[in-house]
Amino acid sequence: MSVKRALLLSTGDRYIVIAFNFATIAAVSRILTPEEIGISVICLAILGIALSAREFASSSFMIQRPVLSREDIRATFSLMLALTAAIAAFLITAAPALASSFHEEKLVPYLRLVSACLFVELVSIQVITLMRREMAFGKVAVINIAGAVTGGLATIALALAGFSYMSFAWAWLASSAVTALLALSLRPDFWMFKPTFKQWRAIAAFGGYNGAMVFLYRAYEALPVLLLGRVVSPHAAALFSRGLTVCQTPDKLILGGAMSVVLPAFAVSARQGGDLKRSYLHALEIVTGLHWPALLALAVLSYPTVDILLGHQWRQVAPLVQVIAVASLFTFSFELNNPVMTAMGSIKDMFVRSLIVIPVSAVIMTAAVLLGGPMGAALSLMVIVPFQAFVSLGFVRRRLSVGWNEIVVAVRKSSIVAALTMLGPLATIIAGGLRFDLSVGQAIFAGGLAAAGWLAGVFVTRHPLSDEIVNAGRTFRDAVAA
C-alpha cells in the first residue's frame, strides 16, 4: 500500500510537471526558430556530458544504503559540491574553445550562466533524494511542480521578451532557486550541508562505477546532437532532438512517475528479502501493456502529433518520430533494469554492460550521422536499441535467474493488446489513401479507436491492467458516493 500511495503521488507529480514541460515546448517551438533552439540543444548536450562527473558522488548512494548515517549524508553532499565546482570551472574556462569548435560563439554566455545554476540546484537534489528514500513523495511533488511552473513560465516570458536561446538558461536559474528555497523550507536540516569527507571511500566505491557508467551513457546520448550540430547545423541537431523528445512522450506519461518510486521500492524489497524476480516480471508486464500501444499509436499518428506539440514549422520531425518510435519498442525494460540492479548492489555489472554496449552503439551512430544526417541517426536506432536491450536483459537475467521464456510469458498479453490498439488507427490510414499526414479531426478519431482497441485488448486478454482499471473505477465510484 505504501508503494501504491507513493506511485499515486509521484505519478500525479510527474503528470503535472510533464503538462507544464510540454506546454513550454509547444509555446517556445512556436516563438523561437529551430536554429535558436538548436543552440540550446547543443549546450544541453555538452552539459549532459560534463554533469556526468557529478555521478561519481551519486545521490543514489543514499537511497540504496542499508543504514544511512549523518556522515553519509554530509559526505555525499560534500563530494557533489566539490565535483560541481570542478565542472563549473571547466565550463567557464572551456566555453570559448567549445564555442569555436562548433563555430557558434553564442554558446559562451549560455555555458557560463548555467555554471551558476549547478550550485543552486545541489540543495534541492540533496533534499529530494532523502525524501525519496523515505518515500515522502508528497513533498517531492510540491518541489517538482513549483520548479516546473517557474521554469516553464520563465522560459516562455523570456522568449517573448527577446532573450532567444538564453531564455532556457535564465529560466533554469529561476527554477533552481525556487526549488532550493522550497526544499529548505520543507526540510530545514542545514546540518546536511556541513562539509565532511569521512565516508568518501564508501561513496567512491559506489560512485566510481556509477559515475563511469553515467559518463558513458551521457556521452553516447549527446553524440548525435553534437555531431549533427558540428557537421551539419544546429537546425539538424534541433530536428533530431525534438524527434527524441516527441518519442519520449509515452515514457514520460506512462513511466515518468513510476520510475521515481521504482528504485526506492526495489531497495526496500531487497533490504527486506523480497522476491525481486517476481516484482520485475510483473513490472515488465505492466510497462509493456502501456508502453507498446502508446509507441505504435505515436508512430502512426506522428504528423498530427508533431503539428500539435511543436507546430507546422517542425514537420520535418514527423518521419524521424516514426522510425524512433518503432525502435523504442525495444526499450521496454530499460527503465527497470538500472533500479533493480542498483537495489541488488550490482553496480559493477551495470558498468561492464556499459563497456559492452556504448562503444558499439557509438560507432554505429557516428557512421549513421556522417552518412545520413538526422534520418541516418534515427535509422541507426533500429539496430542500436535492440542490441542494447539484448545485452541489458542478459545481465538482469543472470542476477535474477530469469529465463527468456519467462520474459516472453510476461509480455505476451501486452503484444496482443498492442496489436488490437493499432487496428483502428491503421484502418483510418488505409481509408485515407495510406496518408499519414492526417488532419486534427482524423487524428482524434483514430486516437479514439486506438483507446477503444486498447481497452478491448486489456479485458479480452485479462491483462493485469484490467484489475487496476476495475479497482480505479471502484475507488472513483466510492469517492463519488461518499
Image (cartoon, rainbow, N blue to C red):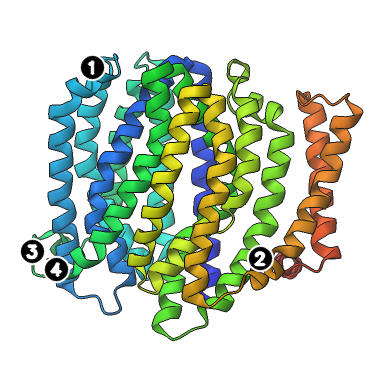
- The Cα atoms of the two marked residues, 4 and 3, are separated by 12 Å
Q: Is residue 313 above or below residue 139?
A: above
In percent of width and height, residue 217 lies at: 38, 47
Amino acid at circle 4: Arg
Q: Which residue is mark 3?
A: 196
- Nearer mark to the viewer, of 1 and 2: 1
Q: Is residue 297 left or right of residue 375?
A: right
Helix, strand or loop under label 4 = helix
The residue closer to the viewer here, 54 or 465, is 54
Q: Earlier in the sequence, mark 3 or mark 2?
A: 3
- How far is mark 1 from mark 2, CA to CA? 48 Å
Residue 181 in sight here: yes
Q: Element under label 1?
A: helix
Q: Amino acid at mark 3?
A: Thr
Q: Does dot 2 land on a helix, a strand or a loop?
A: helix
Q: Secondary structure at mark 3?
A: loop
Question: Disc 1 to disc 3, how far (Cα)?
Answer: 39 Å
Mark 1, mark 3: which one is toward the viewer?
1
Q: Which residue is mark 2?
A: 285
Counting from the top left corner in percent of width and height, residue 460 is at: 86, 64
Q: Earlier in the sequence, mark 1 or mark 2?
A: 1
The image's mark for residue 100 is: 1
Q: Earlier in the sequence, mark 1 or mark 3?
A: 1
Question: CA separation, marks 2 and 4?
Answer: 39 Å
Please tell me which of labels 2 and 4 falls first in the chain: 4
